[in-house]
Amino acid sequence: MSSQYDRPDKTVPGKWKKLRDLSMKSDNRICADCSAPDPKWVSANIGVFLCLKCSEVHRSLGVDTSKVLSLTLDEWSESDMESVIEVGGNSYANSIYEAFLPRNYPKPKPDSSEEDRTKFISSASTFGSKSTKKNVETRQFIGNLKVKVVRGSKLAVRDMLTSDPYVVLMLGQQQVYDHDVISADDIMGEAEIDLQAMITAALAFGDSDIPGNMQVGKWLKTSDNALVEDSLVNIVNGRIKQELHLKLQNVESGEMELELEWLPLDE
Ligand SMILES: [Zn+2]
């Protein structure tokens, strides 16, 4: 038996049949990105079924980001089939990669412009193509972030003499970005935190037992983020921690220092 099957209508046992069966499931009968009916294309590494228009956007991102194959025209390697079968198609892949988009991020529709389509697909697939393969670790990560407020300084005064600040952490519907709001009934500022560096470090080092201390990631200060200084992700005594020094936004003054710590599920 050859390891490559060139046509879906060729009667081949095993993996190709599994892939065809998968393509018949209801969630795979519409495009994973824009919900157009009857998708004929697949991103083999992300594991989703796509319409022609969305497949073209995926293809434009490069084969390392999304490896697009036709269900009817292309030759499929055994490993490409395995990859799709492993992910299981649209529902599961979307639940993972949309989890890393900001809340209410607009999903394209069948008649969306190429620009809207591209914006969504490139954002989602940047993380999704990695995370569908790492789905177990990704699930562990969500819900296991310990946040310690180290200190707030230069906070805005909201009551007559003092303020009584507290921190509200909103994790949206699972997303990369958090909003931290220091508030004393009146809002005393907010800051958006990008958890990408932390997630990447946790995926890479979360299961390892590194006893010493080392730097494993960094979120860089830029002119349009809330950082006062570069934020480092470090392994400290075997634990992954990130220190954040944030300038609060939408307020006249205020800074806040936070420490994030990633906790494995079994703790
Ligand atoms: Zn589509």
Image: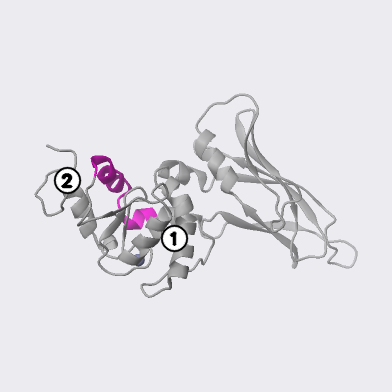
Answer with the quarter of the image where residue 254 lies: bottom right
- Which dot, 1 or 2, sits closer to the camera? 2
Mark on residue 5?
A: 2
Amino acid beneath label 1:
Ile
On the image, the x and y values in percent for residue 108 come to: 42, 69
Amino acid beneath label 2:
Tyr
Residue at point 12% right, 44% down?
Answer: 13
Mark on residue 169?
A: none
Per the image, is 191 magenta? Answer: no
Query: Which quadrant, please, contains the N terminus?
Result: top left
Task: Locate residue 104 relative to residue 240 in the image: left or right.
Answer: left
Quadrant hosting ligand 1 = bottom left
On the image, the x and y values in percent for residue 20 come to: 19, 53
Model colouring: one colour
Instruction: Give the mark count.
Output: 2
Task: Locate residue 139 relative to residue 158 in the image: left or right.
Answer: left
Q: Can residue 206 be seen in this view?
A: no
Task: Locate residue 106 relative to residue 55 in the image: left or right.
Answer: right
Return the disc, 1 or 2, that comes first in the chain's sequence. 2
The residue indicated by pointer 1 is 121
On the image, the x and y values in percent for residue 158 come to: 83, 66
Number of other residues with Cα within 10 Å of mark 1, as a class: few under 14, some 14 to 19, many 20 or more: many
Per the image, is 86 magenta? Answer: yes
Residue at point 37% right, 53% down?
Answer: 93
The one nearer the camera, 250 or 10, is 10
Over which residues does the magenta segment extend?
Answer: 77-93
On the image, the x and y values in percent for residue 195 come to: 59, 49
